Image (cartoon, rainbow, N blue to C red):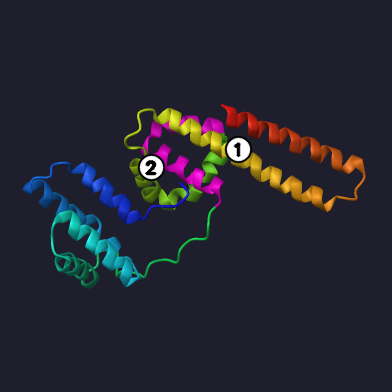
């Protein structure tokens, strides 16, 4: 979770898993699936080095010359899908907090396995869960694919979700604690009556975080 995996890596991993047969027919099926599903994403990459990297990666996996893959990607640029011309890649998003990355992972996991959604809703709260769903809906496919790649081999998805939600709750408390500590710094010369409630809440949050770590 510390570093996002590229969407093209996600797609290649999933497509290879869907075509485990490595004989001639299986390789051809995989090649056509990559051509259909992955080439448009490579064509959208603005950086030629990134394009060359993924073209080479696919060529090695399929046992084909780089030039064959490159020509296929070029055809996608010349004949874009029905959705319109290939657009330059969007700028990289701003760095996200650990809490936000956890929320993305939880969202992807609950979309991929809908049976887990009620558990996440109960832990996060209906209002917050609905807000997350609305905010992350445009990235639904990306985050669902990320969840499948990350947890496709997991035996106990419910346990994985519980751990994610524990980490998420700890981050919520840490963020609140950071805000309170900043306020306390500003109130260094304030009377005890103004400081004591903040100190008490800081102590409560610290205990909650420590207790959660012990679980």
Q: Position of residue 186 (x, y in %)?
A: 82, 53
Taking the magenta stretch, the answer to whether it contains residue 99 is yes
In this rendering, position of residue 119 left or right of residue 60: right
Q: Position of residue 208 (x, y in %)?
A: 66, 31
* Crowdedness near tag 2: few (<14), some (14–19) or many (≥20) residues, C-alpha within 10 Å: many
Q: Position of residue 164 (x, y in %)?
A: 49, 36
In this rendering, position of residue 138 left or right of residue 170: left
Point out which mark residue 9 bears. none
Question: Which stretch appears magenta?
Answer: 97-123
* Residue at 90% over, 40% down: 193
Taking the magenta stretch, the answer to whether it contains residue 113 is yes
- The residue beneath circle 2 is 147
Farthest residue, direction left: 24
Indicate the secondary structure of the residue bearing disc 2: helix
- The residue beneath circle 1 is 170
* Residue at 31% over, 53% down: 9
Cβ atoms under marks 2 and 1 closer than 8 Å: no
* Residue at 75% over, 50% down: 182
* Crowdedness near tag 1: few (<14), some (14–19) or many (≥20) residues, C-alpha within 10 Å: many
Please state, as top left, top right, bottom left or bottom right, where the C terminus lies in the image. Answer: top right
* Residue at 7% over, 47% down: 25
């Amino acid at each position: 979770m510390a570093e996002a995996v590229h969407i093209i890596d996600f797609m290649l991993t999933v497509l290879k898993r869907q075509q485990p047969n490595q004989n001639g027919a299986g390789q051809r099926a995989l090649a056509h699936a990559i051509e259909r599903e992955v080439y448009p994403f490579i064509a959208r990459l603005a950086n030629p080095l990134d394009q060359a990297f993924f073209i080479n990666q696919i060529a090695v996996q399929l046992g084909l010359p780089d030039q064959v893959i490159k020509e296929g990607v070029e055809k996608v640029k010349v004949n874009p899908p029905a959705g319109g011309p290939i657009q330059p890649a969007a700028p990289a998003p701003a760095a996200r907090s650990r809490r936000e990355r956890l929320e993305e992972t939880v969202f992807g996991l609950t979309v991929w396995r809908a049976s887990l959604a009620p558990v996440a809703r109960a832990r996060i709260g209906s209002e917050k869960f609905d807000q997350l769903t609305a905010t992350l809906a445009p990235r639904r496919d990306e985050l669902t694919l990320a969840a499948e790649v990350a947890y496709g081999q997991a035996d106990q998805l419910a346990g994985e979700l519980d751990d994610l939600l524990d980490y998420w709750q700890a981050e919520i408390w840490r963020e609140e604690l950071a805000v309170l500590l900043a306020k306390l710094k500003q109130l260094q010369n304030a009377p005890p009556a103004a400081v004591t409630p903040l100190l008490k809440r800081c102590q409560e949050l610290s205990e909650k975080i420590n207790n959660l770590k012990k679980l």
